[in-house]
Image: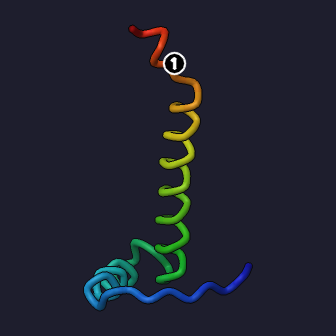
Amino acid sequence: MKIVSVQLPQGLINAMDQLVRKGVYPSRSEIIREAVRELLKKELYALETEERSTPEYILK
């Protein structure tokens, strides 16, 4: 894995730490990895759906 540095607001860090303390995630890194995976799935799905949509000129 590669290391990527990001700056986050303290509120997000506090929320991540709470999830780690409660055992929902093993680490901050895992929270960020999952969040990025979900965002990429959502965005890529939206792009694929957009590309397959019916062209506007056909709908008119």
Q: Position of residue 59 (x, y in %)?
A: 42, 10
Q: Position of residue 56 (x, y in %)?
A: 45, 18
- Give the side of residue 46 with respect to residue 20, left or right: right
Q: Position of residue 47 (x, y in %)?
A: 54, 40
53 w.r.t. 20: above or below: above
- Give the side of residue 51 with respect to residue 23, left or right: right
The kind of residue on which mark 1 rests is Pro
* The N terminus sits in image quarter: bottom right
Q: Residue furthest right?
A: 1
Q: Position of residue 50 (x, y in %)?
A: 51, 32
Front residue of this view, candidates 48 and 36: 48
Residue drawn at x 25%, y 85% as measured from the top left: 11
36 w.r.t. 21: above or below: above
Q: How is the image coloured?
A: rainbow
Q: Secondary structure at mark 1?
A: loop
* The C terminus sits in image quarter: top left
Q: Residue furthest left?
A: 11
51 w.r.t. 44: above or below: above
Residue underneath mark 1 = 55
Residue drawn at x 47%, y 65% as measured from the top left: 35
The number of discs equals 1
Residue drawn at x 56%, y 46% as measured from the top left: 44
3 w.r.t. 35: above or below: below
Q: Residues within 10 Å of mark 1 (few under 14, many from 20)?
A: few
Residue drawn at x 72%, y 82% as measured from the top left: 2
